[in-house]
Amino acid sequence: MSENTAVQGPEFAVLLGMPVVIRSEAMRQVMQLVQRVAQTTASVLITGESGAGKELIARALHQFSLRCNMPWVDVNCGALPEHLMESELFGYEKGAFSGADKMKQGLFDLAHMGTLFLDEIGELDPRMQVKLLRVLDGVPYFRLGGVKKVSVDARIITATNQNLEEGIRAGKFRSDLFHRLSQLHIHVPPLRERHEDIGALAEFFLHQNDPGMRFSPDALEALGRHGWPGNVRELRNTVMRAAIVASGNEIRVSDLPAGIHNAPPLKPSMSPTSLDEMERQMIMQVLGQTGGHHAKAAQVLGISRRTLSRKLKTYGVGDACEALTAC
Ligand SMILES: Nc1ncnc2c1ncn2[C@@H]1O[C@H](COP(=O)(O)OP(=O)(O)O)[C@@H](O)[C@H]1O
Ligand SMILES: [Mg+2]
């Protein structure tokens, strides 16, 4: 097998130097799709819940592509306010504004011949959506304050945990941009739908943290029963915390957070009725786990604080204390 398809046995692959666990049939299928589409030039939209592994898949697409030795550039579209996002993506010329004492290349420029990963694309504001669409259509752009046109050849990969089709219906996301970005679509299933990965990932994270430690059988079973609303990110954080809390070299069920070792299996009657409701429950649960701490919750969920606040507002939940009582 070539370096680019460095799948070592059935469970592990190394992507940009990072080992990843792929045990479930669902993830194997995702990885097969990744290997098939990586070498095309099509833009790829990756969807899935926060923490499910979208960024990992984006990196895999780059690593398996013909551009693997060219730059990999990533940016979180939810992390910056509009005006900074523009200068970040497109760069600026010296003197474009006070403080611009030298030219700065934009991320598009930096990703030339390589891959540009736009994470949380659903957060991109309407004006930047128009600008992005033009660049993707091959129209050269100006750096802020610039007079010279810049043309770039960057492969675009985007990811979102939002339903962009709903965003289009709500008038928040442009449908032309959506179609341009989703020439190919890869969905990363949530961890609860790939049960086999839970134990494998838990063992992997524990081994990475401390090769001398192990799980007791009932601890592993409790991990398998949990719904993992924060997906792989939540599992990794849980394992790290349990490894600190455990007194010996075995993680027992009592070393796991109460929400995990007491959690009854999700009964059908308790299942959320819609995707929105599922998201609301996930956010409330993570807020509960972080003691109502917004920044930590946003980090676990893999969304910006701004997105978290906006979502809480739509639930009629104002601040952390209210969020906890609403749980
Ligand atoms: N299959 C996997 N094997 C190992 N680590 C994983 C796997 N999937 C996700 N992770 C880890 O879980 C965390 C969240 O994954 P990430 O790709 O950032 O999720 P998302 O972009 O969907 O929010 C990262 O630290 C990532 O390395
Ligand atoms: Mg992410």
Image (cartoon, grey):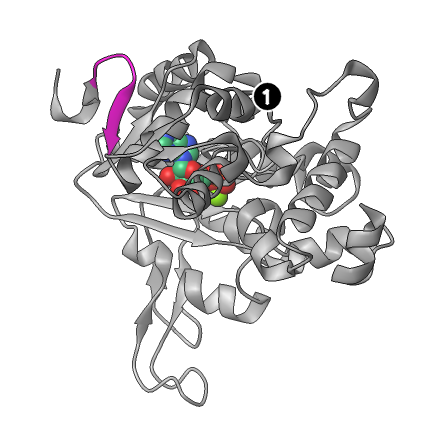
For this orientation, the residue located farthest to the left is 2
Report helix, strand or loop for mark 1.
Answer: helix
Question: Would you say residue 268 sits in the magenta stretch?
Answer: no
**In the image, what residue occupies the spot 72% across and 58% down?**
309
Q: Amino acid at mark 1?
A: Arg
Numbered-mark total: 1
Residue 173 falls in which quadrant of the image?
top right
Residue 269 falls in which quadrant of the image?
top right
Q: Magenta part of the protein: which range?
A: 8-15
Residue 304 falls in which quadrant of the image?
bottom right
Residue 263 lies, in percent from the top left, at 67, 29
Residue 301 lies, in percent from the top left, at 58, 45
Question: Neighbour class for label 1 at 10 Å: few (<14), some, many (≥20)?
Answer: some
For this orientation, the residue located farthest to the bottom is 98
Residue 58 lies, in percent from the top left, at 38, 35
Residue 208 lies, in percent from the top left, at 27, 37
For this orientation, the residue located farthest to the top is 25
Left or right for 265, reference 88: right
Task: Evaluate whether residue 55 shows in this view.
Answer: no
Query: Which residue is identified by label 1?
Result: 225
